[in-house]
Amino acid sequence: MAKQKEKKIASGKEANDVVLQYLKKQNRPYSAADIFNNLGGQVSKTVVVKALATLAEEATIHGKANGKQWVYVAKQDEMEAPSKELMDEMNRKLSQFKDQNAVLQEEIKALQAELSTLNNSLTDDQIQAMLSTLNAENEKMEERLVTLRSGDAPAQLSDKEIKAADAKLEKMRKEWRSRKRLFSDMWGAVTESVPGSIAEFREAVGIETDEAVGVNIADDPLKGLA
């Protein structure tokens, strides 16, 4: 089988001619990226950019900038400047590029914000440790409540002890709410990009919510005690 001939890539004056002839043939405004893609590898992207700069400097073509984006069009033989139609087309393409750039910038900002949130989030190990601590504290409180409800408390509590217990309980409930809110925020950020079922993902990583174990933070754990 004959060896396939390698495609020649133009450079120098030859590349300038290829780019110029393409612009003349199309008679429409194009960016350097458009020309590179449409030429199908005849000229490298770097050489396309250099060729356009050279042709524009020689006044062989017209170039117009909008920020960092340039579009180019071949000069008309019978005119000193492009026609109104061509200028309108150039302005239209520049407007498109500007809109596309604005959309991309917003996407970049959103991704950077998401990355910042993830970087500041708790790790899976930290979340698991926090949940383990809360579950252990909850079990201790449940055991104490069972003892109180059964009437097997070792001794009657004084008013001072009751107030101290109430204060400690309220402190624990505030900490519970704070950690629950923190976990909720972090969990939302972590699972925002998780595909599939969030419930299945939560089960897979071994996380149990208050709702899953029948605990309501709004309930009064001392309700019913007399």
Image (tube, helix red, strand yellow):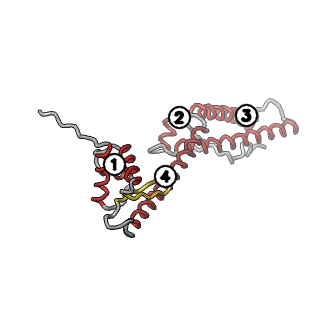
Residue located beneath label 4 in the image: 68
Q: Nearer the viewer, mark 1 or mark 3?
A: 1
The Cα atoms of the two marked residues, 4 and 3, are separated by 69 Å
Please, what is the three-letter code of the amino acid marked with disc 4? Lys
Q: Is residue 185 left or right of residue 173?
A: left
Residue located beneath label 3 in the image: 144
Q: Nearer the viewer, mark 2 or mark 1?
A: 1
Q: Choose the circle earlier in sequence order: 4 or 3.
A: 4
What is the x, y in percent for residue 81?
39, 65
Q: Choose the circle earlier in sequence order: 2 or 1.
A: 1
Farthest residue, direction top: 154
Q: Nearer the viewer, mark 4 or mark 2?
A: 4
The Cα atoms of the two marked residues, 1 and 3, are separated by 76 Å
Q: Are marks 4 and 3 in contact (CB under 8 Å)?
A: no
Residue located beneath label 2 in the image: 206
Residue located beneath label 1 in the image: 36
Q: Choose the circle earlier in sequence order: 4 or 2.
A: 4
Label 1 crowding class (10 Å Cα cut-off): few <14, some 14-19, many 20+?
Answer: many
What is the x, y in percent for residue 156?
84, 34
Q: Are marks 2 and 1 in contact (CB under 8 Å)?
A: no
The Cα atoms of the two marked residues, 2 and 3, are separated by 27 Å
* Figure check: 122 above or below 43: above
**Disc 2 secondary structure class:** loop
* Figure check: 100 above or below 179: below
